[in-house]
Image (cartoon, rainbow, N blue to C red):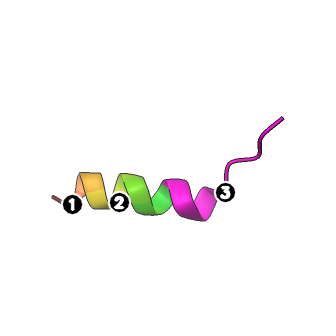
Amino acid sequence: GGRRKPLAVFIIIYQNYTR
């Protein structure tokens, strides 16, 4: 198993979204 943290994912997407 492997639980992804919403915080980490959010930051990654946020940075990519706001280049």
Contact? badges 2 and 1 (CB < 8 Å): yes
Q: CA distance from mark 3 to mark 2?
A: 14 Å
Q: Secondary structure at mark 2?
A: helix
Q: Residue 18's mark?
A: 1
Foreground residue among 2 and 19: 2
Q: Residue at x 49, y 58 (%)?
A: 10
Q: Residue furthest right?
A: 1
Q: Residue at x 15, y 58 (%)?
A: 19
Q: Nearer the viewer, mark 3 or mark 1?
A: 3
Q: Which residues are magenta?
A: 1-9
Asked whether, in this view, residue 11 is left or right of residue 4, the answer is: left
**Dot placed on the residue nearer the N-terminal end, 3 or 1:** 3
Contact? badges 3 and 2 (CB < 8 Å): no
Foreground residue among 8 and 17: 8
Q: Secondary structure at mark 1?
A: loop
Q: Position of residue 17 (x, y in %)?
A: 26, 53
Q: Is residue 4 magenta?
A: yes
Q: Residue 5's mark?
A: 3
Q: Residue 14's mark?
A: 2
Q: The residue under label 2 is which amino acid type?
A: Tyr
Q: Nearer the viewer, mark 3 or mark 2?
A: 3
Asked whether, in this view, residue 3 is left or right of residue 17, the answer is: right
